[in-house]
Image (cartoon, rainbow, N blue to C red):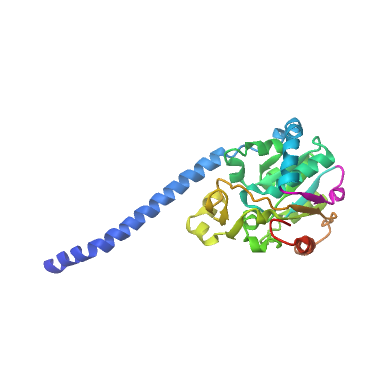
């Protein structure tokens, strides 16, 4: 018995050690991720709609105009479909990774068309607002994507831009560029119904060509517990400048100069519609319009 025990200890030590080693690495990785999550949450600013700064927007519009017009060759259509005053819910498809160039283009177009004094807010993921160098987004009216912030924005008669597809849609593979994919999220329909505000769809194409997005990385995100810690269901993988292989897009990337085209559709009154039917109508109309924009393009990036 003593001999058998000694033998088992000798041969079983390596596998046991490897198991303990793997377990220790997993625990260490979990602690690191938890620490990063805590730090990211601390960096997320408290939502303050008054951080929007019309003077700052006015001063920076020329630079944004050059970026949109010369680099992205932006074409924004249908702004007249947005009511000229009062609260309105703008619902867009989301593209371009964490940098979302179509949002910058649309912000420029909206502010130029309606003037910087008109309240305009955009909802963004907490992590985007906590990323280094993106604090200026708050001066443009960007706040964390929560139901409470959406309510606050509509309470002050703002135009509110939401992206129901969130991180799931913005990191879809580049070959799905012309696909509206909200992942079944219908909170925006309920919001429009409860507040009885016009719902105006906004479709954009080109953003998903600013890098080569390969995978959402859903399994990897689940394995690392990112959903629980960051509300992230994806850990995207792309080929992007200057990193080459870009995992997570946490540090952003240099977008390729893809042509960005945005179309604002006519308002949809969902107040008397069933949530599911309203969702189907909105996404169907958006998909039809996005398919039309895609058919206008001859080549990726070049447009």
Q: Is residue 68 magenta?
A: no
Q: Quadrant of the N terminus?
A: bottom left
Q: Position of residue 93 (x, y in %)?
A: 72, 55
Q: Spot the residue most to the top.
A: 55
**What residue do we see at 79% from left, 63% from top?**
292
Q: Position of residue 131 (x, y in %)?
A: 58, 41
Which quadrant of the structure image shows residue 16? Answer: bottom left
Q: Is residue 79 magenta?
A: yes
Q: Is residue 65 visible?
A: yes
Q: Is residue 152 visible?
A: no
Q: Total number of numbered labels?
A: 0
Depth check, front residue: 186 or 51: 51
Which quadrant of the structure image shows residue 181? Answer: bottom right
Which quadrant of the structure image shows residue 293? Answer: bottom right
Identify whether 160 is placed above or below 176.
above
Residue 16 as seen in the image, left or right of residue 91: left
**What residue do we see at 48% from left, 59% from top?**
223
Q: Position of residue 302 (x, y in %)?
A: 71, 56
**What residue do we see at 74% from left, 31% from top?**
59
Residue span colored magenta: 72-85
Residue 184 as seen in the image, left or right of residue 32: right
Residue 93 as seen in the image, left or right of residue 134: right
**What residue do we see at 46% from left, 44% from top?**
35
Q: Quadrant of the C terminus?
A: bottom right
């Amino acid at each position: 018995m003593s001999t058998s025990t000694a033998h088992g200890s000798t041969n079983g030590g390596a596998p046991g050690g490897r198991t303990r080693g793997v377990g220790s690495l997993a625990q260490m990785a979990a602690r690191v991720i938890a620490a990063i999550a805590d730090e990211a949450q601390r960096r997320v600013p408290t939502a303050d709609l008054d951080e929007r700064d019309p003077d700052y927007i006015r001063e920076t519009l020329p630079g944004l105009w050059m970026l949109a017009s010369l680099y992205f060759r932006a074409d924004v259509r249908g702004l007249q479909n947005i009511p000229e005053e009062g609260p309105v819910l703008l619902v867009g498809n989301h593209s371009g990774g964490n940098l979302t160039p179509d949002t910058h283009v649309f912000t420029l177009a909206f502010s130029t068309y309606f003037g910087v004094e008109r309240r305009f807010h955009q909802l963004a993921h907490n992590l985007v607002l906590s990323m280094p160098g993106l604090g200026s987004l708050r001066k443009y009216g960007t706040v964390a994507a929560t139901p409470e912030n959406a309510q606050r924005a509509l309470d002050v008669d703002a135009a509110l831009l939401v992206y129901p597809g969130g991180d799931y849609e913005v990191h879809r593979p580049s070959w799905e560029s012309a696909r509206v994919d909200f992942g079944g999220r219908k909170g925006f329909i309920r919001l429009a119904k409860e507040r009885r505000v016009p719902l105006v769809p906004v479709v954009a194409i080109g953003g998903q060509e600013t890098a080569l997005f390969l995978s959402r990385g859903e399994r990897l995100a689940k394995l690392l517990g990112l959903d629980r810690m960051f509300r992230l269901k994806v850990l995207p993988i792309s080929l992007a400048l200057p990193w080459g292989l870009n995992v997570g897009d946490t540090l952003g990337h240099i977008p390729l100069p893809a042509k960005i085209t945005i179309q604002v559709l006519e308002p949809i009154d969902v107040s008397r519609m069933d949530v599911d039917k309203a969702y189907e109508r909105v996404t169907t109309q958006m998909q039809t319009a996005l398919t039309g924009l895609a058919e206008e393009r001859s080549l990726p990036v070049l447009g």
